[in-house]
Amino acid sequence: MEAFAVPDIPEIGAGDDIAELIAERTTLRDDDVVLVASTVVSKAEGRSAALGDFPAGPRAREVAERFETLTGEEKDPRFAQAVLEEATEVIVAEPFMLTETAFGHVGVNAGIDTTNTGGDDLLLLPKRPSESAARIRAGLPTDSPVVVTDTSGRPFRHGQRGVALGWDGMAASRDWRGESDREGEELEVTVESVVDELAATANLLTGEGDDGTPVVVVRDWEFGDHEGSENLYRDADTDFVRQALREWEYES
């Protein structure tokens, strides 16, 4: 397969038409997958914010004070308030805030960015990334699937990698269950998260700094004839790691 960044995407502002900007700068095919960084989606959807929009309540001040006590680093309680308001659950409050968003993504600080914000204090994640992906896809001249991506860390590993937040026009996962391995053993649990793998591919080109390449096209990749699954986020009842973290207490 081939992956390439769409060139010359300008700084995005509220109300900008991302699909139009993409179509003006590259020729797409129906079987291309278009991967768009959540930062530009958020900017287009007006998800920039000022710290002053989040006056800190008692819980936020408590979190900020506890963070400073544990790490020796100052945490703005208004930022903590923004995280609390964007999260549906705070799974871990210290030494960092691990949260779940309304659309199911689990990550640090509800995915709120303080860099590449376009001049604002904060950049919040899109409210409903799969709906964002559907709007972008509807505006493209082709029937290309669209994936909205972000970067986040992974337990047990250093560093960040690209992940999918929302998608439209393709299944989230390839389901290998019921097929056989090379020794003829039936696969019972293997479900491949292809939207995450494509997001990670895109992140090799979008980068993490000032590259200014927030849109990547993956070409000549095929989903194959596997069954598809829309499940990406584990529900709390079957997420045993989350259940364990709820009972975990940080010891400095």
Image (spheres, rainbow, N blue to C red):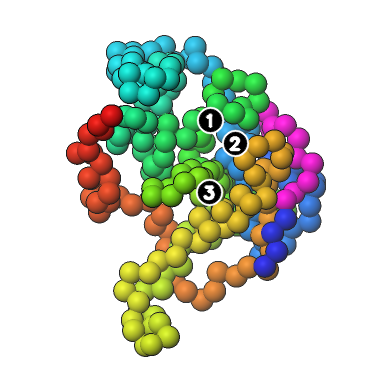
Q: In the rendered image, which quarter is residue 232 located in?
A: bottom left
- Residue type at mark 1: give it: Asp
| Marks 1 and 2 in Cβ contact (< 8 Å) | yes
What quarter of the picture does the C terminus occupy? Answer: top left
Q: Secondary structure at mark 3?
A: strand
Drawn side of residue 164 relative to residue 94, left or right: right
Q: Which residue is mark 3?
A: 161
Marks 3 and 1, how far apart at CA = 15 Å
Q: Nearer the viewer, mark 1 or mark 2?
A: 1
The amino acid beneath tag 3 is Arg
**Above or below for 79 versus 21:** above
Looking at the rendered structure, the kind of residue marked 2 is Thr
The magenta segment is 5-16
- Is there a contact, CB below 8 Å, between mark 2 and mark 3? no
Res 209 quadrant in image:
top right
The disc at residue 39 is 2
Name the front one of labels 3 and 1.
3
Could you tell me how far apart the alpha carbons at marks 1 and 2 are, in whole angstroms? 8 Å
Residue 244 is at least partly visible in this image: yes
Where residue 170 sits in the image (x, y, percent)?
A: 53, 60
Left or right, 215 with reference to 198? right
- 44 falls in the magenta region: no
Q: Could you tell me which residue is drawn at 25 percent across and 41 percent down? A: 245
Residue at x-position 50% and y-position 16%: 51
Choose the circle earlier in sequence order: 3 or 1.
Answer: 1
Which is closer to the viewer, label 2 or label 3? 3
Q: Nearer the viewer, residue 187 or 252?
A: 252
Numbered label attached to residue 204: none
User: Which labelled disc corresponds to residue 113?
Assistant: 1
Q: Earlier in the sequence, mark 1 or mark 2?
A: 2
Residue at the extreme bottom of the image, as rendered: 184
